[in-house]
Image (cartoon, grey):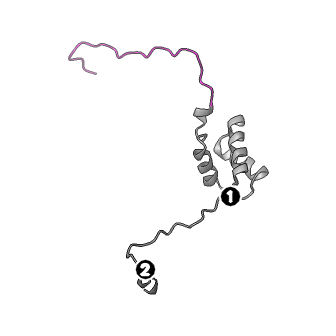
């Protein structure tokens, strides 16, 4: 009650920490992003490599946030697009009206 009396406004303050704890430094994040681009490992395999060689305390969710932040979270976006022409899509079979399945 005392902390509310000392405030100028009645709205509740944010419960978010003032300084968010990140497990990876900027240099480590750059190394992880480059590792993802070159090896194209899935998230769980990349997590094992990061825990072994870069940061033992890295979490899966923190690593996923890092990859999303740098735009390399989807492996499909990292794979080279094939220049081969795609096969034409097949149309539906034209049946006469009143056809019973």
The structure residue drawn at horizontal position 20% and vertical position 17%, both measured from the top left corner, is 98
Where residue 72 sits in the image (x, y, percent)? 61, 40
Q: Could you tell me what secondary structure mostly forms the magenta stretch?
A: loop
Residue 86 shown left or right of residue 1 in the figure: right
Between 45 and 78, the residue placed more toward the observer is: 78
- Bounds of the magenta segment: 79-101
SS type, badge 1? loop
Residue carrying label 2: 7
* Picture quarter with the N terminus: bottom left
The structure residue drawn at horizontal position 68% and vertical position 58%, both measured from the top left corner, is 23
Which numbered disc covers residue 1?
none
Residue 12 shown left or right of residue 60 in the figure: left
Check the image and name the residue furthest to the left. Answer: 98
Residue carrying label 1: 23
SS type, badge 2? loop
The structure residue drawn at horizontal position 51% and vertical position 16%, both measured from the top left corner, is 86
């Amino acid at each position: 009650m005392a902390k509310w009396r000392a405030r100028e406004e009645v709205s509740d303050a944010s419960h978010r920490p003032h300084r968010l704890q990140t497990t990876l430094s900027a240099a480590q994040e750059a190394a992880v992003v480059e590792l993802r681009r070159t090896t194209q490992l899935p998230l769980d395999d990349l997590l094992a490599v990061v825990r072994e060689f870069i940061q033992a305390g890295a979490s899966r969710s923190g690593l996923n946030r890092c990859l999303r932040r740098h735009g390399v979270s989807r492996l499909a976006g990292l794979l080279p697009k094939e220049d081969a022409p795609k096969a034409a899509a097949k149309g539906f079979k034209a049946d006469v009206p009143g056809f019973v399945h």
